[in-house]
Amino acid sequence: MTVTLSREKRTVTDAGRPIRHERSEPGGQPAPQPRAQPMPVVAVTGAAAGIGQALTTGLAASSQVKRVIAIDASRGDVAGVTWRVADVRDPALGGRLGGVDVVVHADVDLAPDSDARQRRAFNVRGAQTVLTAAAAGRVGRVVLISSAMVYGARPDNPVPLPEDAPLAADVDASVAGDLLEVEHLARRAQRANPGTAVTVVRPAALVGARHSPLDTLVTRHFEAPRLLKMKGTAPRWQFCHVDDLVSAVECALAQGLDGRLAVGCDGWLEQEEVERLSGLKSIELPPRLTFGTAQRLHGLGVVPTPATGLRYVVYPWVVDCATLRQAGWQPRYDNAAALRMLLDQRQGRHAAAGRRIPRKEATITAAGATVAVIGTAAIVRRARRGRRRTDP
């Protein structure tokens, strides 16, 4: 891929170093050009499915990458890569990183139905092992795939959030809580092992994996028959197509971008536009009733995620992709196109409160609300109104 830098009209070479305009040395001779660096060998964890599979496929086709090493607990079906079977939690992972220049760690469990303790152990232990193995193996860079969820979803969030905004996600048993802990590990690893650079990539709500559709709280929200809306708030939606995530990682590798990078479509969609594009209507409920009901249902095991997970489908967490944009990167997809792809991939699946449900049960739930929590809240409200009408 050739990346054109917008401001200075410089072009990134295959070696990832910009071509500089010639300068004349004293005596009229052109200045010597920097030697081209070899293209990196990139290892991708979680390469057999989901985000990791998309990154493996995309980077294998990149002109910026010499070779891709695919790492997973079982061999996948991506062609043109070298497979090395390994569990990312195994301390012996370092032995699988021989000859690797960059590790892209994408083996992260984001599924709403995962047991919270097991998911936390997998996500945190996996990131810790990858960071330690990379440092021990003198790998030059680790790219951690995180999420813009770490910024938190709040009704008063600025739109968009700057990349250097505080990480305000809830420190709980949610996926966002896992990713907060992973990012803390990344900061400590960077201080302890300065020879291994760490780049953290924070995509907006991911959609679009063709071979292995993504399963997240946001994708399940659009499998429900209604969309949830909080009274007094204005939801705003931003997505990130996995192809744009791939090109963002490619740009980060080519230009050696450090630090934290937000990735997503330009701008955002208002709730009214989401309803028009999806054909789904919203149900509006008071926050206190909804979050209280959701937490009770979570405590009873009815819904898989804490009530704080609902924040990500009712409050804004739109990000500004300033660093990548300044580097010349641009998303290929807009939010409307990304939403259409999400809607196309939901066919035949139904969800309530983040829990997959049979079609028959989904039809019943549809009469009440978008998710089990909404259905329960609506039933409670109707029952209260009915008691008031019948009381003497």
Image: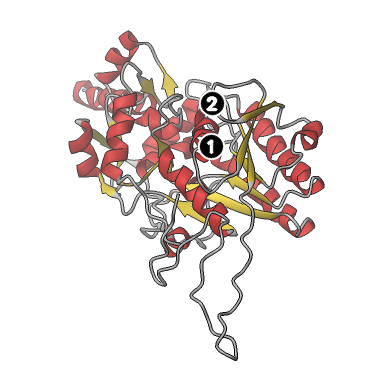
Query: Which residue is nearer to you in this view: 38 or 370?
Result: 38
Q: Identity of the amino acid at label 1?
A: Ala
The answer to the question of whether label 1 and label 2 lie on touching residues, with beta carbons closer than 8 A, is yes
Q: Is mark 1 on a helix, strand or loop?
A: helix
Q: Point out residue 283 in the picture as x, y percentages from the top left corner.
A: 25, 33
Residue at 37% from the left image edge and 11% from the top image edge = 358
Residue at 44% from the left image edge and 67% from the top image edge = 10
Give the residue pinned by disc 1: 60
Residue at 61% from the left image edge and 53% from the top image edge = 199
Q: Point out residue 134 in the picture as x, y percentages from the top left corner.
A: 75, 45
The C terminus, quarter of image: top left
Identify the mark nearer the N-term, 1 or 2. 1
Q: Residue 78 carries which label?
A: 2
Q: Point out residue 285 in the picture as x, y percentages from the top left corner.
A: 30, 37
Q: Residue 304 carries which label?
A: none
Answer with left or right where residue 371 lies relative to residue 176: left
